[in-house]
Image (cartoon, rainbow, N blue to C red):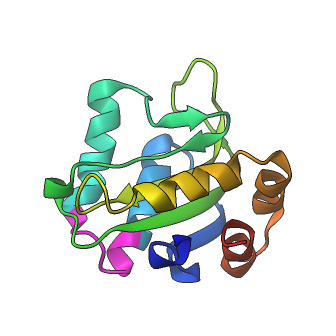
Amino acid sequence: MIDEFVTPDTIAVNVKVDTWQEAVHYAGSLLLKSNAIEERYINAMVNKVKELGPYIVIAPQIAMPHARPEDGTKKSAISIITLDKGINFGHEKNDPVKLVIALAAVDNEAHIEALAKLMEVLGDSDTLDNIFSSKSPQEVYKCISQ
């Protein structure tokens, strides 16, 4: 199920960024390259955080930026990036973030099952450690598609 939304092409490891905005842009750029979104979707993800705060930091070390389907989604997809160092998004408890999972969805239902599976995988601390220590997109993909 996850492989319908994530491929090694939408994964990057040890990404070097200095701000949460750069992290969101980078994760969004992978969705853009895969033709899942229009460029304006990336700005919409950043603007949502500016408007609503760091609600996208959903668990310790994990952020899930997203925007509305009408903000430029072409097809449902997920990108995953690991960061070379933790970045603060401004969340009181879950900063710093080391894993960014950008989500593009064409509607409110298509991606739910894949997202539930991904959250199940990420809820396992051993798997999360393996993702953080992965040296390639293929290694991350293997961790999440088990």
**Is residue 2 in sight in this rendering?**
yes
The stretch of residues the image draws in magenta is 31-39
Q: Quadrant of residue 32?
A: bottom left
110 is higher (above) or lower (below) than 24: below
The outermost residue toward the top is 92
- Left or right for 146, reference 130: left
Residue 30 shown in magenta: no
Q: Is residue 29 left or right of residue 120?
A: left
Residue 16 shows in this picture: no
**Residue drawn at the location 30% of the way across and 56% of the way down:** 42
Tell me the residue at 50%/74% (across/down). 10
Q: Is residue 32 magenta?
A: yes
Left or right side of 3 for 46: left
Residue 103 percent across, percent down from the top left? 40, 57
State which quarter of the image contains the C terminus. bottom right
Q: Nearer the viewer, residue 130 or 108?
A: 108
Judge whether 89 appears above or below 141 on screen.
above
Q: Nearer the viewer, residue 144 or 31?
A: 144
Where does residue 130 sit, x and y in percent of width and height? Answer: 83, 61
For residue 49, above or below residue 115? above
Above or below for 24 versus 53:
below
Q: Residue at x 63, y 30 (%)?
A: 95
| Residue 34: image location, x then y, percent | 37, 80
- Percent x, y for residue 23? 50, 52
How many numbered discs, if any?
0
- Say which residue appears at 45% left-offset and 37% top-offset: 56
